[in-house]
Image (cartoon, rainbow, N blue to C red):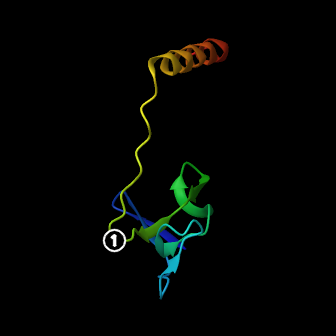
């Protein structure tokens, strides 16, 4: 993977997978991937940046599954837990 900054925009170059292959889950076809986090050199205040990139195509007719709406009781429990975590962390 190659990376450059031009006019304030990060440009990434990845090799194209030809022919495209199935993802690990089998739901999509991968066209290009970084195969996990990769360190790239950018002018980021002297630090190394990390990029994770996946370019994929979903199959015809794919519909993203929707989550079931949670009930009021479960929503209240989650809200109480979030508040408790915020208090402990000092936010």
Report which quarter residue 85 is drawn in: top right
Q: Which quadrant is the N terminus positioned in?
A: bottom right
From the top left corner, tell me how far across and down residue 3 is, in percent.
49, 69
Numbered marks: total? 1
Report which quarter residue 35 is drawn in: bottom right
Residue at x-position 55% and y-position 60%: 52
Report which quarter residue 68 is drawn in: top left
**In front of the other: 4 or 51:** 51
Q: Which quadrant is the C terminus positioned in?
A: top right
Residue at x-position 42% and y-position 50%: 65
From the top left corner, tell me how far across and down residue 34 is, in percent.
56, 69
From the top left corner, tell me how far across and down residue 33 is, in percent.
53, 71
**View extreme (bottom): residue:** 19
Residue at x-position 37% and y-position 63%: 62
- Badge 1 crowding class, 10 Å Cα cut-off, few under 14, some 14 to 19, many 20 or more, is few
**In front of the other: 15 or 57:** 57
As drawn, 32 above or below 40: below
Give the left or right position of residue 73, taking residue 59 as reference: right
**In front of the other: 44 or 30:** 30
Residue at x-position 50% and y-position 16%: 73
Q: Secondary structure at mark 1?
A: loop
**View extreme (right): residue:** 88
**In front of the other: 19 or 39:** 19
As drawn, 64 above or below 31: above
Q: Which residue is mark 1?
A: 60
């Amino acid at each position: 993977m190659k990376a450059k900054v031009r006019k304030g925009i990060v440009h990434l170059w990845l090799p194209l997978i030809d022919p495209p292959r199935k993802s690990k889950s089998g739901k999509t076809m991968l066209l290009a991937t970084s195969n996990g986090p990769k360190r790239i050199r950018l002018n980021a205040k002297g630090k190394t940046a990390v990029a994770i990139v996946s370019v994929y195509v979903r199959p015809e007719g794919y519909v993203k599954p929707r989550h079931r709406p949670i009930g009021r009781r479960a929503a209240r429990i989650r809200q109480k837990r979030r508040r408790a975590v915020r208090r402990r962390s000092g936010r």
